[in-house]
C-alpha cells in the first residue's frame, strides 16, 4: 500500500495535475482572504472559506479524473485486479495521495489566522474550526471524484460528471426550496446530499460531531462504491449459489444502510453531546447563569414562537432548544402567523414581527419582539443599520424571570427639576432587568416610598429645595440607594447647594470647572469628550477591559478621605495628564480626576449607597451609540446592582461582529503579492520544470 501511495503521489507531482490544483486553490482563496480579511477587516476566516468552497466544483475533478479512469483507459486496471494487494488498499492509497496534495494548500491557509492576528484581535478558534470543516468538505469532494472516475475510462466524462455531481450537491438547498418551501419526504431525502449545509454548521464556529460523521461516512461510502465498481470487472456470473454480483449488491446495500443508521443515531443525540461551541463569545451556548436559572424554575413556562419551526431564526432557535434540554418546565411551541393569524392578538394590540416570542406562565405573559433580540447600529455615512449583537438569551431569561416572579423591583425617577427622561434603549434596559419605574415628585409627597429600591436623579437643571433634600436625607438614613448623573455647572456647589448637601452625606463633592484630557487615547475628537479609564467593579462587569465609556463634558468628583462612616471607590477616572479648567479656560488643577464613583455610607445597621457620574449625557442613546453599548451596559449594571436583579448583568449582549483588523496599505500589498503572485507562480514554475526534465529523459 505504501508503494502504491508513493507511486500515485509521484505521478501527481511529475505531471502538472498536482501543481495546478495547489496553485489554483491558493490563488483563489488568497484573493478572497486579501479582500474580505485584510481589506474589509473581517477577523474571522470563515467568511473567506465559505466564499471559496465553490472552487471545489472545478478543481477537484482536475485532481481526481485520472485516478481510476486513466487505469482503465490504459488497460493497467488488470494489474490492480491481479495484484497481491487488495483493491481496498489500492483505492485507499490513491485517495490518500490526493488528500496529501490537498493538505498542502490547507496548510498554507492555516497560516491565515496567524497573519490576521498581527493586525488585531482575531477569531482564532472559529477560524480553525472553519478550516477543519473546509478540509473535511474537500476530502469528501475528492472521494466523490474518485468514485466517478471509477465508473468510466474517459477522462473527459469523469471530469464532466464530477463537475455536474458537485454542482448539483451544492444546489440541493435551492432545489429543495423550489420543490417545497414547507418540506416533504422527497426534500428530506435530498437533504442527505446537501454537503454545503454540513460545512455551514461547522463554519459558524460550532464543532459539530454530526457534520464530522456525515463527511467521514460520505468518504467511506464513496471509497466502498469505488472498490465495488473495480471488483465488478472480475466477477463472473455463476448459476449455482449466490452470484458474486448479487453478493456485491447486497454488501453495497448493507454498507449504505449501516452508514445511514450511524448518521441517524448520531443526529438523534442531544446537541449538548454532539456540539462544542468554539466561538469566543459562546454565541451558541447558554451561559452558566441561564442554566442555573432554568434549573431553578418552579413554574411551567411555555414559549410561543410566531413562526414555523422550519423558518425560525437559527441563532434564536438554537437558544430555545438548548433551554428545553436543561429543564422539563420549559416548552417551546410554534404558531405560524399564516396558520394562526389572530393568535398574537390575545397578548398585544400592536403589530409584532415574525420570530417574535410570547413567554407565558399561568396568567402572566411577556411579548419579546424579535427586533429586541438583536442590537443594531446606524451608520450616518451609509444610512444603513448593521446588526452588531445578539441579545436573545438575555431577553428570554428576563421574560422568564418576569412571568415566574411574584413582584417587580421598583425604581423611582426624580422629577420637578428639569431632569432628563430615560431614552428608549435605557427604558428597555430597565424592562429587561424586570424593574418597574415610576416618576416621583418630592414636592408632592411626604416621604420617599418604602418600596423604593433606588432613586434615579438624571442631570437636573435646577436645584432641590431644602424640604426635598431633607426627604432624601431621611431616605439615605433608611439605607436608600441613589444613582445620580449631573450636568455641567461651572461652580456646582453654589449652583446646586441642596443637591451638593445630599452628596456630602456620602463624603463627596463636585469640583468647579470641566475636565480636559491630555492623553490623546483618553478622549474622542475633543479634549472634553472623555473616554475615562474603567476600574474593576461589579458595576463595570462586561465593560472593564472589553469596552469603553463615553463622557462628553464632565466634572471632577472630590472624595473626603477623612470621613469615617463612608467608603468611596473610584469607578471612572481620567489620565494623569488631565486638566481641570474654568469656563474662561484657566487651568485650575492638573492630574487624574474621578468622573464616576461608588460610595457606601454606614449608619448603624443600615448601608446607603450612591453611584455618581458627572456627565449629563452619559445615559443618552446618542452617546451610547458611540460606545457600541458600553454606557448602556454601565447603566444596566447599576440598576441590577441596586435591585438585586442578576438576569441583566449575568447575560450580556453577545457581539456578532468581531473586531476589525487594521491593516496598513503597505502590509496588505506585501501579503497580496506573496500569496497571489509569487507563491502560485513558484508552484506552476516548479511543476513545469519537473515535467520538462521528465520529458527530456
Image: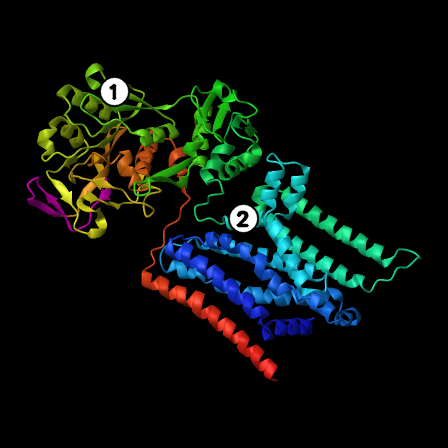
Q: What are the residue bounds of the magenta stretch? A: 569-590
Where residue 218 sits: x, y (%)? 66, 53
In the depicted view, which residue is nearer to us: 478 or 535? 535
CA gap, disc 1 and disc 2: 53 Å
The image quadrant that residue 216 belongs to is bottom right
Residue visible at 6% across and 44% down? 586
In the depicted view, which residue is nearer to us: 151 or 249? 151
- In the rendered image of this protein, does residue 200 appear above or below residue 182? below
Where residue 18 sits: x, y (%)? 58, 69
The local secondary structure at tag 2 comes to helix
Is residue 586 covered in magenta? yes
Is residue 350 covered in magenta? no
Contact, mark 1 vs mark 2 (Cβ under 8 Å): no
Q: Residue furthest front?
A: 156
Where residue 614 sits: x, y (%)? 19, 36
Label number found at residue 364 = none
Mark 1 or mark 2, whichever is nearer to me: 2
In the depicted view, which residue is nearer to us: 427 or 644? 427
Q: How packed is label 2: few (under 14 Cα within 10 Å), some, or many (20 or more)?
A: some
* Residue position marked by numbered label 2 in the rendering: 200
In the depicted view, which residue is nearer to us: 623 or 696? 696
Residue visible at 70% across and 55% down? 221
Label number found at residue 440 = 1
- In the rendered image of this protein, does residue 657 appear above or below residue 124? above
Residue visible at 47% across and 36% down? 290
Judge left or right: residue 258 versus residue 126.
Answer: right
The image quadrant that residue 671 belongs to is bottom left
Which sits earlier in the primary sequence, circle 1 or circle 2?
2
Q: Is residue 642 visible?
A: no
Where residue 11 sits: x, y (%)? 63, 73
The local secondary structure at tag 1 comes to strand
Amino acid at each position: 500500500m505504501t508503494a502504491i501511495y508513493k507511486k500515485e503521489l509521484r505521478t501527481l507531482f511529475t505531471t502538472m495535475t498536482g501543481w495546478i490544483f495547489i496553485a489554483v486553490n491558493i490563488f483563489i482563496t488568497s484573493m478572497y482572504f486579501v479582500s474580505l480579511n485584510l481589506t474589509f477587516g473581517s477577523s474571522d476566516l470563515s467568511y473567506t472559506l465559505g466564499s471559496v468552497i465553490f472552487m471545489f466544483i472545478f478543481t477537484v475533478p482536475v485532481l481526481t479524473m485520472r485516478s481510476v479512469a486513466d487505469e482503465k483507459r490504459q488497460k493497467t486496471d488488470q494489474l490492480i485486479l491481479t495484484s497481491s494487494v487488495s483493491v481496498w488498499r489500492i483505492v485507499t492509497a490513491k485517495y490518500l495521495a490526493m488528500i496529501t496534495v490537498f493538505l498542502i494548500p490547507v496548510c498554507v491557509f492555516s497560516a491565515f489566522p496567524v497573519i490576521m492576528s498581527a493586525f488585531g484581535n482575531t477569531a482564532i478558534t472559529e477560524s480553525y474550526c472553519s478550516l477543519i470543516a473546509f478540509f473535511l468538505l474537500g476530502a469528501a469532494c475528492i472521494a466523490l471524484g474518485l468514485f466517478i472516475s471509477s465508473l468510466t475510462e474517459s477522462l473527459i466524462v469523469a471530469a464532466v460528471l464530477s463537475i455536474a455531481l458537485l454542482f448539483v450537491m451544492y444546489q440541493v438547498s435551492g432545489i429543495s426550496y423550489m420543490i417545497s418551501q414547507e418540506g416533504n419526504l422527497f426534500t428530506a431525502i435530498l437533504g442527505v446530499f446537501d454537503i454545503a449545509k454540513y460545512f455551514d454548521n461547522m463554519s459558524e464556529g460550532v464543532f459539530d460531531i454530526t457534520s464530522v460523521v456525515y463527511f467521514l461516512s460520505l468518504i467511506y461510502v464513496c471509497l466502498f462504491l469505488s472498490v465495488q465498481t473495480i471488483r465488478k470487472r472480475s466477477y463472473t456470473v455463476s448459476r449455482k449459489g449466490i452470484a458474486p454480483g448479487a453478493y456485491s449488491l447486497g454488501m453495497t446495500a448493507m454498507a449504505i444502510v449501516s452508514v445511514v443508521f450511524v448518521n441517524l443515531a448520531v443526529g438523534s443525540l442531544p446537541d449538548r453531546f454532539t456540539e462544542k461551541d468554539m466561538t469566543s463569545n459562546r454565541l451558541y451556548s447558554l451561559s452558566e447563569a441561564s442554566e442555573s436559572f432554568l434549573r431553578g424554575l418552579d413554574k411551567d413556562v411555555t414559549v410561543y414562537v410566531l413562526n414555523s419551526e422550519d423558518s425560525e431564526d437559527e441563532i434564536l432557535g438554537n437558544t430555545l432548544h438548548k433551554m428545553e434540554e436543561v429543564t422539563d418546565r420549559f416548552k417551546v411551541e410554534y404558531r405560524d402567523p399564516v396558520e394562526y393569524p389572530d393568535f398574537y392578538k390575545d397578548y398585544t394590540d400592536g403589530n409584532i414581527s415574525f420570530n417574535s416570542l410570547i413567554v407565558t406562565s399561568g396568567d402572566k405573559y411577556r411579548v419579546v419582539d424579535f427586533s429586541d433580540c438583536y442590537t443594531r447600529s446606524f451608520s450616518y455615512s451609509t444610512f444603513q443599520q448593521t446588526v452588531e449583537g445578539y441579545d436573545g438569551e438575555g431577553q428570554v431569561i428576563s421574560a422568564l424571570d418576569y412571568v415566574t416572579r411574584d413582584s417587580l423591583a421598583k425604581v423611582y425617577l426624580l422629577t420637578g427639576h428639569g431632569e432628563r427622561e430615560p431614552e428608549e434603549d435605557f427604558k428597555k434596559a430597565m424592562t429587561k432587568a424586570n424593574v418597574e419605574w415610576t416618576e416621583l415628585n418630592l414636592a408632592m409627597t411626604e416621604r420617599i416610598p418604602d418600596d423604593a429600591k433606588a432613586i434615579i436623579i438624571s442631570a437636573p437643571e435646577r436645584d432641590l429645595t431644602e424640604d426635598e433634600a431633607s426627604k432624601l436625607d431621611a431616605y439615605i438614613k433608611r439605607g436608600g440607594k441613589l444613582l445620580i448623573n449631573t450636568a455641567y455647572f461651572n461652580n456646582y456647589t453654589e449652583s446646586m447647594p441642596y443637591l451638593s448637601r445630599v452628596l456630602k452625606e456620602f463624603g463627596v463633592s463636585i469640583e468647579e470647572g470641566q475636565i480636559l484630557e491630555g492623553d490623546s487615547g483618553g478622549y474622542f475628537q475633543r479634549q472634553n469628550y472623555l473616554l475615562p479609564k474603567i476600574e474593576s467593579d461589579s458595576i463595570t462587569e462586561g465593560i472593564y477591559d472589553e469596552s469603553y465609556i463615553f463622557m462628553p463634558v464632565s466634572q471632577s468628583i472630590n472624595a473626603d478621605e477623612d470621613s469615617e462612616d463612608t467608603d468611596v471607590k473610584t469607578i471612572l477616572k481620567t489620565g494623569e495628564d488631565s486638566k481641570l479648567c474654568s469656563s474662561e479656560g484657566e487651568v485650575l488643577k492638573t492630574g487624574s480626576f474621578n468622573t464616576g464613583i461608588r460610595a457606601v455610607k454606614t449608619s448603624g445597621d443600615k448601608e446607603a449607597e450612591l453611584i455618581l457620574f458627572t456627565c449629563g449625557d452619559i445615559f443618552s442613546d446618542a452617546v451610547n451609540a458611540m460606545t457600541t453599548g458600553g454606557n448602556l451596559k454601565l447603566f444596566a449594571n447599576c440598576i441590577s446592582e441596586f435591585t438585586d436583579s442578576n438576569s441583566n448583568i449575568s447575560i450580556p449582549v453577545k457581539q456578532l461582529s468581531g473586531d476589525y483588523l487594521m491593516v496598513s496599505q503597505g502590509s496588505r500589498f506585501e501579503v497580496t503579492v506573496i500569496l497571489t503572485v509569487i507563491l502560485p507562480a513558484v508552484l506552476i514554475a516548479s511543476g513545469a520544470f519537473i515535467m520538462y526534465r521528465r520529458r527530456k529523459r
